[in-house]
Image: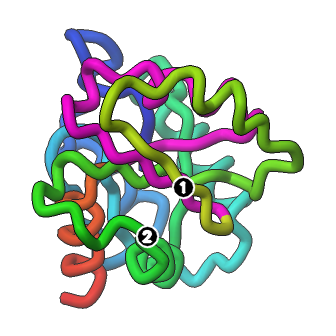
């Protein structure tokens, strides 16, 4: 998952070019989903750090910027979906699942709770942070600030996107 691309006319990265670049790196079964940086591929490389370094360097060389990358395996996607504590939510675009690089060492629930607007709720399960945003992501202070409070890198996708990414990995 690439962060901060194709947003507001900044960090433009056509997905067709990202797929071609990924092919040159030796990735296989390459697919992208929507324009927000969802790159699905398989590789024989086992080390996530190696993949991140190679992909980041290639993107920087070709596009002139290096977005933050978050590698999430198919099994990690499925585990976060299975651990979803908010199965009662009927609109999948109102539930954000943030994939964290690590489990936070310290969790300041008071600070997190102070960001919630009416109706919002959150849960942390392992390296997944769930945020129910009944008024939408654009109005949520938590969606913007959780990463800085938890002090771990994270990137979020709504439930509909997570389900689609899982579907693509199984195809």
Most extreme residue toward the front is 118
Segment colored magenta: 127-156
Front one among 72 and 115: 115
On the image, the x and y values in percent for residue 127 come to 65, 62
Q: Nearer the viewer, residue 104 or 56?
A: 104
- Residue pushed farthest right? 105
Q: In this view, does 148 lie to the left or right of 44?
A: right
Horizontal side of 104 relative to 171 (left or right) equals right
Crowdedness near tag 1: few (<14), some (14–19) or many (≥20) residues, C-alpha within 10 Å: some
Q: Which residue is drawn at 57% across and 83% down?
A: 44
Q: In the figure, residue 57 lies in which quadrant?
A: top right
Disc 2 crowd, CA 10 A, few/some/many (<14, 14-19, 20+): some
Q: Distance between the residues labelled 1 and 2?
A: 7 Å
Residue 143 screen position, x and y as percent: 44, 30
Q: Mark 2 points at which residue?
A: 85
Is residue 133 rendered magenta in the image?
A: yes
Q: Residue drawn 38% across and 24% down?
A: 117
Label 1's element?
strand
Image position of 13 with respect to 71: above or below: above
Q: Out of 118 and 143, give the one closest to the viewer.
A: 118
Q: Which mark is residue 123?
A: 1
Are the residues at dot 1 and dot 2 in contact (C-beta closer than 8 Å)?
yes
Q: Which mark is drawn over residue 153? A: none
């Amino acid at each position: 998952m690439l962060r901060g691309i194709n947003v507001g006319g900044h960090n433009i990265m056509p997905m067709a070019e990202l797929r071609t670049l990924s092919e040159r790196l030796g990735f296989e079964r390459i697919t992208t989903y929507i324009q927000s940086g969802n790159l699905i591929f398989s590789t024989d490389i086992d080390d996530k750090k190696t993949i991140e370094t190679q992909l980041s360097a290639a993107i920087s060389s070709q596009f002139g910027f290096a977005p933050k990358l978050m590698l999430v395996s198919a099994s990690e996607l499925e585990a976060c979906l299975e651990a979803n504590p908010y199965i009662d939510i009927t609109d999948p675009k109102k539930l954000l699942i943030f994939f964290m690089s690590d489990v936070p060492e310290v969790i300041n629930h008071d600070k997190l709770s102070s960001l919630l607007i009416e109706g919002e709720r959150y849960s942390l399960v392992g390296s997944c942070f769930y945020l129910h945003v009944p008024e939408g992501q654009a109005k949520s202070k938590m969606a913007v600030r959780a990463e800085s409070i938890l002090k771990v890198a994270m990137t979020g996708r709504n439930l509909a996107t997570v389900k689609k990414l899982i579907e693509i990995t199984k195809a």
